[in-house]
């Protein structure tokens, strides 16, 4: 009876912590952006009975790759110009084609909030303007990379905040740049703002609803990397992003899964993730995430602490990390360890 009371008390505390000032207000609930990309219906209609176009929702990335492998340049350009939002978001499409398609799609929105994403030299691998917007950006040469890392961010990230001015080496684009530089500018690092994240610390952040939808998208994204011949990736998962990675891990071919500032992975221990990837965890001494109780009751809370000894993850030194977002700060032991894992050097 005492154990039950302690568990329920922790659950109540978890709700209080994650709800914060947002409380249980309905306005905190985000509308999940999922399904095929905008323009999918027009894309399907453009196919013929003799040569249908791969369905953006049901075709596997491998099937998409085979389709584009059979096209000549003229047909590729025709599809690119007519359907940039589909071509730019279709996993398995050749990388240069996706970069160009997304530049066209971003420019076509005419929205100032997205304009910087179309700047020369940016490699936008996916772009969806619906809702708060989603974007995936590559740093480095993904076509030639011998190692690939994917940054999976937590709450309050979308296409607008993806590269917004903020403290250096924070945010999806900032952390990707920091990791790419720390790894010696070799390989490729991908900033994956590719799912609907929670806003603030309300009910969405305490539940797994958005993480479940994000895990489906992350698994498909990694299958797309495999379809174009990229190496098995390392997933670097921050905060709520570690919940996404915990749910997606069994469905990816990730080489390593690295979680930091994690509220839990919806698993009681490493074995429950059902992945062949090595799992690593880090938490800094001043990270407020330590105050979030590691319980899961009635769908609220994310379970065991990945940084605890009992979880079974490999530990990463984080004693010089400041706060909840300082894990990629230059000069920290944590960033050095991250770079070693990214290069495949850590054992």
Image (cartoon, grey):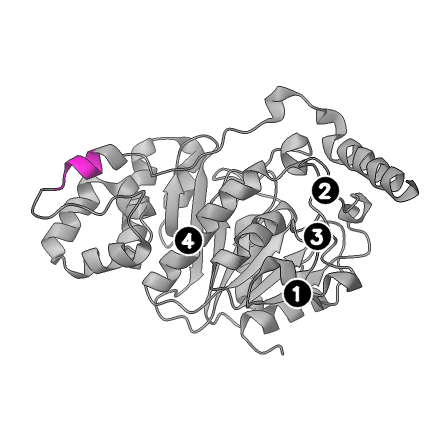
Q: Earlier in the sequence, mark 3 or mark 2?
A: 3
Residue on which the image places disc 4: 221
Secondary structure at numbered mark 2: loop
Question: Can residue 43 be found in the magenta stretch?
Answer: yes
The quadrant of the picture occupied by the N terminus is top right
* Pointer 4 with pointer 2, Cβ within 8 A: no
Q: Answer whether residue 169 is visible to the viewer in this image.
A: no
Q: Earlier in the sequence, mark 4 or mark 1?
A: 4
Above or below 84: residue 322:
below
The quadrant of the picture occupied by the C terminus is bottom right
The answer to which image quadrant residue 114 occupies is top left
Q: Residue furthest front?
A: 1
Question: Can residue 22 be found in the magenta stretch?
Answer: no
Which percent across, then down, holds residue 154? Answer: 60, 45
Label 2 neighbour load within 10 Å: few <14, some 14-19, many 20+: many
Secondary structure at numbered mark 1: strand
What's the CA distance linking mark 3 and mark 1? 12 Å
Disc number placed over residue 261 in the picture, else none: 3
- Residue at position x 43%, y 74% from top? 146
Magenta-colored span: 42-47
Residue on which the image places disc 2: 296
Which percent across, then down, holds residue 145? Answer: 41, 70
Which percent across, then down, holds residue 202? Answer: 68, 31
């Amino acid at each position: 009876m005492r154990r039950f009371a302690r568990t329920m008390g922790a659950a109540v505390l978890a709700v209080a912590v994650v709800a914060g000032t947002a409380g249980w207000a309905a306005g905190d609930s985000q509308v999940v952006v999922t399904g095929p990309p905008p323009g999918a219906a027009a894309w399907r209609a453009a196919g013929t009975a003799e040569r249908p176009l791969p369905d953006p929702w049901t075709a596997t990335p491998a099937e998409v790759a085979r389709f584009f492998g059979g096209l000549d340049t003229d047909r590729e350009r025709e599809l690119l110009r007519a359907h940039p939002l589909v071509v730019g978001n279709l996993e398995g499409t050749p990388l240069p084609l996706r970069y160009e398609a997304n530049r066209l799609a971003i420019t076509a929105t005419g929205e100032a909030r997205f304009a910087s994403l179309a700047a020369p030299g940016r490699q936008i691998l996916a772009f969806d303007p619906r809702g708060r917007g989603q974007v995936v950006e590559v740093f480095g040469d993904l076509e030639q990379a011998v190692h690939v890392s994917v940054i999976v961010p937590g709450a309050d990230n979308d296409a607008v905040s993806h590269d917004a001015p903020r403290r250096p080496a924070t945010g999806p684009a900032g952390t990707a740049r920091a990791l790419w530089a720390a790894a010696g500018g070799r390989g490729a690092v991908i900033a994956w703002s590719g799912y609907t994240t929670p806003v603030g610390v309300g009910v969405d952040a305490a539940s797994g609803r958005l993480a479940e939808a994000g895990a489906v998208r992350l698994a498909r994204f990694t299958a797309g990397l495999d379809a174009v011949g990229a190496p098995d990736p390392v997933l670097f998962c921050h905060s709520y992003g570690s919940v996404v990675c915990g749910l997606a891990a069994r469905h990816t071919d990730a080489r390593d899964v690295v979680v930091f500032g994690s509220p839990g992975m919806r698993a009681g221990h490493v074995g429950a993730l059902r992945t062949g990837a090595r799992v690593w965890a880090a938490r800094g001494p001043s990270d407020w995430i330590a105050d979030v109780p590691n319980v899961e009751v009635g769908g609220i809370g994310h379970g065991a602490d990945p940084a605890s000894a009992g979880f079974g993850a490999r530990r990463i030194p984080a004693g010089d990390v400041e706060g909840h977002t300082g894990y990629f700060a230059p000069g920290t032991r944590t960033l050095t360890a991250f770079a070693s894992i990214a290069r495949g050097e850590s054992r």
